[in-house]
Amino acid sequence: MDWTLIIVIAIIVIVVLVVIGLYNGLVTRRNRIDEALGQIEVQLKRRHDLIPNLVEAVKGYMGFEQNVLTQVTQARANAVAAGAQGPAAQASAENALTGALRSLFAVVENYPDLKANTNVMQLQEELTTTENQISFSRQHYNATVLDFNNAIQTFPAVLVAGILGFTKREFFDAEPEAAEVPKVDLTLS
Amino acid sequence: MATTFYSQIGANKRNSILLVLAVVALLGVLGLAIGWAVTGDPRAAIPSLGIAITIGLVASLVSYYSGDSIVLGISGAKEVTAEQAPQLINVVQEMALAANVPMPRVYLIDDTAPNAFATGRDPEHASVAITIGLLQKLDREELQGVMAHELSHVRNFDIRFSLLVGVLVGSIALLADFFLRFTFWGGGRRSRSSNEGGGAIQIVVFVIAIMLAILAPIMARLVQMAISRQREYLADASGVELTRNPVGLERALAKIALDKEPLEVANRATQHLYFENPIKAADGRSSNLFSTHPPAIERINRLRELYGQPKITDAVQVLDAAAMRASAPGSAAFVGGSGGPPPPPPRDWNRPS
């Protein structure tokens, strides 16, 4: 009688300890995702802040391609608005912005004065590095999401993840536009 | 992927400890031999044994904690800020992010020979140094390839092991040099006068001591060579894993390989730290056994193998191919049709790959 009680208590204690361990592990993983997302957001914000300066700097030179500038401005506004709609929506808006920026820089190549402008060169370098940092942070973020999603969908955490309120997280998706050639109107001159 | 680089970190930490133990032991034997040879009495060699072991331990501690400053100091490296070299700092920042290590300190070496190295005891205390020549000769994409290679060394803890190898092997060589001079000019005479009857044993010990003194630096040097070549291949591969772009690193290797200028600030103790062997042999083929780095062409071919490209026989081919791509009709509009060398196009904007 006493022995059964002791065994039952021991089993309960073990189960509780295992659940605590699982819970803590999942929380650590989830926090890593949030940290990685925070990193991406810092850089996205930086990019959003740089774009108006760039638009301002090239506006005077680019008589013909006002539509390229409008596209960039519009894409930026969409990206800023998408910030609150979750990683997947945000990723697609940011990808559109990346595409618009690529078109803009491709057009800049046609203006020797503009290309030689220190301010524009500086902004281009800043945007390039921000873009690269976004893509490296995104790799890191997606790796943490994969790790978390795997953890909550595999045994043993799968038994408790639902009850403890852990749900699958979204990837910050790889950009489909990356494979496309930027659409640039080169019919000017 | 994860397993290989974690096991690499483990191996480097383990090897660092083994290296320190080996160096202390080697110094101990040397100290004992020196003491014995000089006094002709094994018991009288105990103080010199103690001194040698202490030197080994102190040298290890100094190399571990301030070896990076020593190495940067003797290379004449100056720390740079984002204002002085914005693109360099940006590229390093990107690669630190990709490698998931803290931002290292960045140094410039005032030398026109293109090269770079990373050093430090761990990723939290890491530095990368590049020559002004490298910064001038490489475009952004190539610079990114080189920095990815360097930050792979940082992430893998290669920097710790290489630093200890450099400073400790350097100090063994120094000590052996000193011993050779000491026995020939001073010690030899004194031991003869103080202990005339030592005779044959003393001579044998003396010969062993000299042999040790000659062999120690050679052995140490061979270890240094053996370790760093495999490491370079691995860092190249991990670098590409970080940038997801083998072309930059490949072109950088080709450019640096074709540059025949030697790096003045590099010496025998620091050569293995560099991106590409800074002490260039007059004959490329002679570098096979005694070089700290695999030949650049071999490194390029290993990279090409990774992404299914045919092997090449001359580094010039890499640059020719790149020049051809840049002047291809399709991309002329992006380059702007200017003559001369292709301008450094930031790949992410105008060349979707």
Image (cartoon, helix red, strand yellow):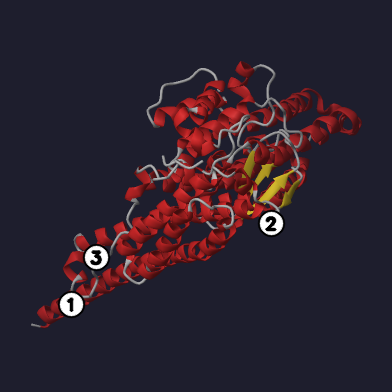
In the displayed structure image, the side of residue A7 where residue B111 appears, left or right: right
According to the image, label 1 marks what residue? A12
According to the image, label 2 marks what residue? B81
- Residue at 58% x, 45% y: name it: A111
Give the amino acid at mark 1.
Ile
Q: Chain of mark 1?
A: A
Question: Marks 3 and 1: CB-CB under 8 Å?
Answer: no
Q: Nearer the viewer, residue B310 or B75?
A: B310
- Tell me the mark number nearer the camera, choosing from 2 and 3: 2
Cα separation, mark 3 vs mark 1, equals: 28 Å
Cα separation, mark 2 vs mark 3, equals: 42 Å
Image position of A123 with respect to A188: above or below: below
In the displayed structure image, the side of residue B70 where residue A176 appears, left or right: left
| Rendering coords of residue B60 (x, y %) | 66, 49
Image position of A85 with respect to A113: above or below: below
Q: Quadrant of residue B193?
A: top right
Query: In terms of secondary structure, where does tag 1 sit?
Result: helix
Cα separation, mark 1 vs mark 2, equals: 59 Å
Q: Nearer the viewer, residue B245 or B282?
A: B245
Q: Quadrant of residue A164?
A: bottom left
According to the image, label 3 marks what residue? A168
